Amino acid sequence: MEPLGATTIFLAVCISCLLFLSAWKKMSGSGNLPPGPVAFPIIGNALQLYKKNLPQSMRELSAKYGPIFTIYLGSERVVVLYGHEVVKEALIDQGDEFSDRGRMPVFERLPDKRGISMASGVPWKELRRFTLTTLRDFGMGKKSTEERILEEAHFLVERLKNTHGEDQLYVCWKLELRSQLKSFCFS
């Protein structure tokens, strides 16, 4: 073997080993995480999950490791809560621990993190509370809102039937949208 080929192969093996060890260190430094299957570097538990039937995979892992277990999707660590009782306990009994939002790398690059879609922590909780209160004031979740929407939808369908295929869909939609907004705001 020539020296250049041996050097190239040696460098490729060294770089592969460094990448492998780096990924392994990231995945094994889990701290106090729930148990789970051993994950491969870079691909995680992809070989142990049935892509066609993911619920069956989760059921099998739950039977083996308990209702709370850790898997890796690629190199991303995921803690799975499997079962109604466990999810209920996590979201209701320990709601304060789980009420914050997860990390969203897309939004981390934006300089101005305002608004309900980008906030997290205390500002997000305040925005969420304000939004839900305002929507409830406008009738979200009330039966009267559903009845009004169905009534307006019925009027829209009737109006569309009367157009006979003419090009008035945009005007009709705009009028119905205005009617719906007026109905919500002023009644």
Image (cartoon, grey):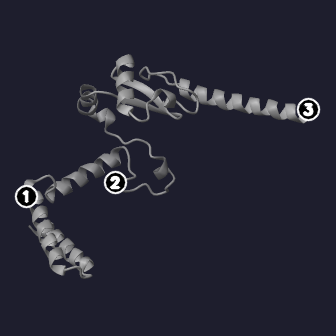
Give the distance between the C-alpha atoms of the residues marked 2 and 3, in whole angstroms.
60 Å
* Screen quadrant of the N terminus: top right
Residue linked to disc 3: 3
Residue linked to disc 2: 116
Q: Across the whole image, how many numbered discs are drawn on residues? A: 3
Q: Is residue 150 left or right of residue 87?
A: left
Mark before the other along the chain sequence, 1 or 2: 2
**Residue at 34% over, 25% down:** 59
Spot occupied by residue 138 in the image (x, y as percentages of width and height): 15, 60
In this rendering, is residue 36 above or below 53?
Answer: above
Which of the numbered marks, if any, corresponds to residue 144?
Answer: 1
* Screen quadrant of the C terminus: bottom left
Q: Residue furthest top?
A: 64
Q: Say few, some or many: other residues with alpha carbon within 10 Å of mark 3 (under 14 / 14 to 19 / 20 or more).
A: few
Mark before the other along the chain sequence, 2 or 3: 3
Q: Is residue 42 left or right of residue 2?
A: left
Q: Nearer the viewer, residue 58 or 158?
A: 158
**Residue at 38% over, 50% down:** 119
Q: For residue 17, what is the image quadrant?
A: top right
Spot occupied by residue 7 in the image (x, y as percentages of width and height): 85, 32
Give the distance between the C-alpha atoms of the residues marked 3 and 1, in whole angstroms.
82 Å
Mark before the other along the chain sequence, 3 or 1: 3
Q: Say few, some or many: other residues with alpha carbon within 10 Å of mark 2 (under 14 / 14 to 19 / 20 or more).
A: some
Do residues under tags 3 and 1 come within 8 Å of each other at their CB atoms? no
**Which element carries disc 3, helix, strand or loop?**
helix
Mark 3 vs mark 1, foreground winner is: 3
Q: Amino acid at mark 3?
A: Pro
Q: Amino acid at mark 1?
A: Ser
In this rendering, is residue 173 above or below 59?
Answer: below
**Which element carries disc 2, helix, strand or loop?**
loop
**Which element carries disc 1, helix, strand or loop?**
helix
